Amino acid sequence: KLRHQRAELEEQASAPDLWDDQAHAQEVNSRLSYVSGEISRLERLRSRLDDAALMLEMAEDNTAAAALYAAHGFVPIGRRPRYYRRGRHFVDALVLRLRLAKSPHST
């Protein structure tokens, strides 16, 4: 929607008779500046969201949790050796990540 507004405002701003009405010209240019700024702000925010992820850890021997997390898109990205104690022995922890942004959104 904002990109559509910007295109319309750019078209108005490029009209040869724009400055015949200075108040209107200032309004068009002011609105164009505002809309362009909002698009830039939203694009920066989208970029930051694209980098967002949810991370968790689980015991390597927890097969039920592994299946659940895998079904929801979590992928292993690391391991913590001997992290969980199981009586007299230790089990590694798996570190999993899920990227939160799945697809690009339009502004």
Image (cartoon, rainbow, N blue to C red):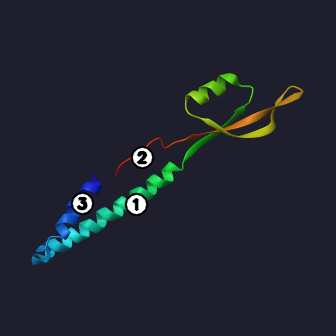
Residue 73 location, quadrant: top right
SS of the residue under disc 1: helix
Q: Is residue 104 left or right of residue 12?
A: right
| Residue 41: image tag | 1
| Residue 7: image tag | 3
Circle 2 sits on which residue?
Answer: 104
Indicate the amino acid at tag 2. Pro
Indicate the amino acid at tag 3. Ala
Residue most extreme to the right? 88
Indicate the amino acid at tag 1. Arg
Q: Whole-percent x and y of residue 77?
A: 67, 41
| Residue 54: image tag | none
SS of the residue under disc 2: loop
Q: Whole-percent x and y of residue 66?
A: 65, 27
In this view, the mark in front (1 or 3): 3
In the rendered view, would you say 88 is above or below 75? above
Which is nearer the N-term, disc 3 or disc 2? 3
Q: Whole-percent x and y of residue 30?
A: 25, 70
